[in-house]
Each structure stands twice: as C-alpha cells, then as structure tokens.
Image (spheres, grey):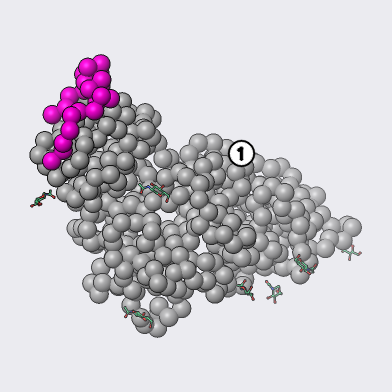
Amino acid sequence: MEYLNKLLLLACATFSVMSLVKSQNQQGFISLDCGLPSNESPYIEPLTNLTYISDVNFIRGGKTGNIENNSETDFISKPYKVLRYFPEGTRNCYNLSVKQGTKYLIRTFFLYGNYDGLNTSPRFDLFLGPNIWTSIDVLIPGLGTSTPMISAIELRPLRYDTYTARTGSLKKIVHFDFTNQRKEIRYPEDVYDRIWMPYSQPEWTQINTTRNVSGFSDGYNPPQDVIKTAAIPTNVSEPLEFIWNSESSDDQTYAYLYFAEIQKLKTNETREFKIVANGRLDYTNYIPTKFEAETLINPAPLKCEGGLCRVQLSKTPRSTLPPLMNAIEIFSVIQFPQSETYTDDVIAIKNIQSTYQLSRISGQWQGDPCVPKQFSWIGVSCNVIDISTPPRIIALDLSNNNLTGEVPEFLAKIKSLLVIRLRGNNLRGSVPQALQDREKNDGLKLL
Ligand SMILES: *[C@@H]1O[C@H](CO)[C@@H](O)[C@H](O)[C@H]1NC(C)=O
Ligand SMILES: *[C@@H]1O[C@H](CO)[C@@H](O)[C@H](O)[C@H]1NC(C)=O
Ligand SMILES: *[C@@H]1O[C@H](CO)[C@@H](O)[C@H](O)[C@H]1NC(C)=O
Ligand SMILES: *[C@@H]1O[C@H](CO)[C@@H](O)[C@H](O)[C@H]1NC(C)=O
Ligand SMILES: *[C@@H]1O[C@H](CO)[C@@H](O)[C@H](O)[C@H]1NC(C)=O
Ligand SMILES: *[C@@H]1O[C@H](CO)[C@@H](O)[C@H](O)[C@H]1NC(C)=O
Ligand SMILES: *[C@@H]1O[C@H](CO)[C@@H](O)[C@H](O)[C@H]1NC(C)=O
Ligand SMILES: *[C@@H]1O[C@H](CO)[C@@H](O)[C@H](O)[C@H]1NC(C)=O
C-alpha cells in the first residue's frame, strides 16, 4: 500500500527507430532538458557541445520549475537549472524512442534546488517500463508524499559487445579517472559521454604522459585524458588498493579496470603485478601494454562480503616497478524481470485511446496498461500470470465515456479480451461482424 501513497515517475521506453539528433558525432544521443520551454529548444550546452532539446514532446502533463538562483547554483550547467515536476497523476511517463537491439547508457538527473520554495527533498520511485529502477531521495528522506521532479534525461548508445553482464543490466556505481586534476571528463572527450570523476588517495602518486595512448579495439574507448593519467602506490613496495562499498552484500558487482603503461621503461625495468578481487586471484602476472589501453573485466560477478569490495594489485617478485591503474568503472547488476504487456494488446488499446476522447480516464492512461499492477489503467483488467509472461488485457470498461460513432471494430483484435463494457455512451450502428464473431466463437461478452 505504501506504493499507492507515493507519486511515481516512470520512464517508459517504447521501441521504435528514430534519430533525434542528426549531428554526426552525437549519433543516437537523446539529451532532454526537462521543463525547458519549447521556444528555447534546441540549444547547445557550451561545456560539452551537446544539443539539448525540450522534453515537451515526450511527456503529457507536468509543469516547469526553476531552481533557486544563488551563489551555489551559479555554476550549475543549463540543463539542470530547469526541471519538470508532476503535481498530478499517480504516474507520469516519458515516451522515448530507442533503437531496438542497441545497448544504451541511460542517465537521469534530479536537481531539486528548492524550485518550489518548500525546502523539502522529493521522494518518489523511478521505473523503467514496468520495473522499478530506483527510489529517488534527493536529500534527507522527508515524511509523507512528495511531488516527483526530473531535471534531465540522457540516453547514449554503446557498442553492443561492451558492458555485458551474465544476466540483467548494469547500474553504475562509479567511473573514476585516477588523476590529481580536478576536472570531470565527459563528451566530447568521451565518445560515449560517460562521466569520469577525478579520484586519488593520499597513499597514491599520480603519473601522466603527454604521449597519445592507442588501442581501443575492445570498444571501451577511454578518453585520452583519462587513460593518459594513472596512479601508483607512493611506497613502491606496497600494493595499489581500491576499496568501495556495495549497497548490499548480495549485490553482484562488475569492475572494469583500465590499464596502459604510460612510462617509458628502461630495458632493465619491468612492471608486472597480480590482480586480486575480493580474495579471488583474477590475474597472476599482468603486464600493462606500452602506450596501449586495455580493459580488464572480472569474468564472473563479484560478491562483496559484508558489503565491502576490494581490488588489490601487488607487484610480482620479478617486477622492478610498482603496479599502476589508470581508471576504474564499477557497476552492480540490476534485474528488470517484469515483462511488458503483450505488444498487440498494447497497440490495440493505444488505438482506442487515440481514437476516442476518453476524457474521464485517459489522463491516467500512461505507460504500460497492466503492470506494475498497482498502476494498471483505469477501466482495464489484465491477466498477469507471472513476471516472465507478458500480461494480457482481458476486460475493458469504457462505460460512461461519452463515446460517439460506431462500435469500435478493432476491439476484436485484443484476442484475450473476454468482457467489454460499453454502456452509457452514444455509440450508434450495429455491432461489427468481427466482434459478433468473437462473441460467438470465443464467448466475448459485450455489456
Ligand atoms: C564546441 O564547438 C566549437 C565549434 O565547433 C568549438 O570551437 C569548441 O571547441 C567546442 N567545445 C568543446 C567543449 O568541444
Ligand atoms: C533564475 O535566473 C534565471 C535567469 O536570470 C531566470 O530565468 C529564472 O527564472 C530564475 N529562477 C528563479 C527561481 O527565480
Ligand atoms: C511514443 O513515441 C513514438 C514515436 O514518437 C510513438 O510512435 C508512440 O505512439 C508513442 N507511444 C506513446 C505511448 O505515446
Ligand atoms: C602531470 O604530472 C605533473 C607532475 O606531477 C603535474 O605537474 C601535471 O599537472 C600532470 N598533468 C596532468 C594532465 O595530470
Ligand atoms: C594525439 O592525437 C591527437 C589526435 O589524433 C593529435 O592531434 C595529437 O597531435 C597527438 N599528440 C601526440 C603527442 O602525438
Ligand atoms: C613501505 O612499505 C614497506 C612494506 O609494507 C614497509 O616495510 C616500509 O616501511 C614502507 N616505507 C615507508 C617509507 O613507509
Ligand atoms: C637499470 O639500469 C640503470 C642504468 O641503465 C641503473 O641506474 C638502474 O639502477 C637499473 N635498475 C634496476 C632496477 O636494476
Ligand atoms: C458527457 O457529456 C455530458 C454532456 O455533454 C457532460 O455533461 C459530461 O460531463 C460528459 N461526461 C464525461 C465523462 O466526459
């Protein structure tokens, strides 16, 4: 029941081919500045040269909010200064067209910025299609309900053979660039627009090169600025260790370690180390390739006992140089197990929605018609067997909707439909043949 008390924001991905940004080098990028008035769309964000567009054509409802102007928000870049909030509806859905069979990096931004003057952090759940993605809790958890809001949505296509979990999808924990520079790195330096945050530890020494690093055939393509810097332990006899917390000890974790030898080694010098992840020896004697990037991934997901994860690089006895690491990405596995409603049923019901002005209920008709169950559409009953079976629509209640015209024949196309209630409308004409056939053959009831 707690779900029903909360307002929800859903990102609903539907699948059709559409290129939103024609620019050659932002191919397939979708960059929505939520709440941006359409007369200010599109614009080029100067720090990244990314083209942002307004979200108006991807959402029904919601209102524009502006974050507070003060010395702290002065430095916030344009896409995050304006937002869309949703004072109405139990769920609000973005409809984004993605390319089927493409792997995407999906990023959402929520910058509250006291846009409503209430100084109360928003709390709501975020879904991807019918599956929960995460709970948004921008600051300190508040009590009771709160209005969902969103600042930006960014989709970036990735190479299909990269970032592959054994099962499920990957949720980013960190992208760290081991450097003592302060600046974050993203597009255009990063062709996939991953956002790399600078990271160092007191016991590390940073090294860097001005030479270019090659070798991006594996598709991970770290930006030059990321791969040209690395960390080594200051005490060269010590291992290089990176420790992080996982949200729970059940989390399955993948670490992507980026390496390139960026020092010119003398003939009598060797850099060779073993890589141990949570006590499991993954590599016994790894040698970073000279001025060539390589990405090492744990072959099986890591389980972090007690929620503590650890990657340790220790030099082998024959190594004259300490271990080095240039960058790291960490992900946990996230499952999206709930199937979407059977496609033909969805097409048919959307057809009804667009043909008739279902004023009483259509505002609520957003996202998947059947799942999650607590948000199934008003007037729609579904047969939901289990999460891996696409739900089917079995009854439709269109009574008292002021429908006019003919009885809609295409209702016959929802093959699983057992009951259609049409009372209280001004429909004329006889019942179409296709529906009569369904009544006779399948026991469909027209009430
Ligand atoms: C953005 O594009 C302009 C014009 O092509 C270029 O001069 C500028 O350096 C670019 N900025 C970034 C951050 O790439
Ligand atoms: C902040 O300043 C911008 C630009 O001057 C303005 O458009 C916006 O409405 C202001 N926001 C608020 C909350 O006053
Ligand atoms: C989503 O957008 C696509 C393309 O713009 C459109 O064909 C489809 O009907 C939309 N779906 C919904 C549920 O609005
Ligand atoms: C490279 O290392 C030198 C010496 O530590 C440092 O002064 C410089 O800022 C570093 N440059 C980059 C790009 O990290
Ligand atoms: C590195 O590569 C860039 C882009 O290909 C090139 O412009 C630059 O001259 C190269 N730098 C060096 C030191 O080779
Ligand atoms: C470096 O590490 C070694 C091995 O842990 C230790 O014996 C030595 O005291 C350390 N040196 C310094 C300067 O901390
Ligand atoms: C490698 O050779 C150089 C001289 O070319 C010498 O100064 C250095 O100590 C040697 N390093 C090792 C680890 O043997
Ligand atoms: C149906 O139409 C009548 C008369 O036009 C109107 O009073 C009523 O509010 C409408 N009902 C709905 C559910 O739209």
Task: Measuring from the top left, give residue 424's x and y in whole percent.
Answer: 9, 39
Residue 375 location, quadrant: top left
Q: Residue at x 32, y 59 (%)?
A: 137
Q: Amino acid at mark 1?
A: Pro
Is residue 125 or residue 258 the one in the foreground?
Answer: 125
Locate the N terminus and report the quarter of the image it occupies: top left
| Residue 89 highlighted magenta (yes or no) | no
Is residue 118 or residue 192 the one in the foreground?
Answer: 192
Is residue 301 or residue 389 the one in the foreground?
Answer: 389
Residue 446 location, quadrant: top left
Which residue is denoted by mark 1 in the rendering?
299
Q: Residue at x 20, y 28 (%)?
A: 431
Residue 432 seen anywhere in this rendered image of the structure: yes
In this picture, is 376 found above or below 203?
above
Residue extending farthest bottom: 71
In this picture, which residue range is highlighted in magenta?
426-447
Q: Residue at x 66, y 49 (%)?
A: 219
Residue 134 seen anywhere in this rendered image of the structure: no
Q: Residue at x 28, y 25 (%)?
A: 434
Task: Measuring from the top left, give residue 118's x and y in whole percent.
Answer: 23, 72
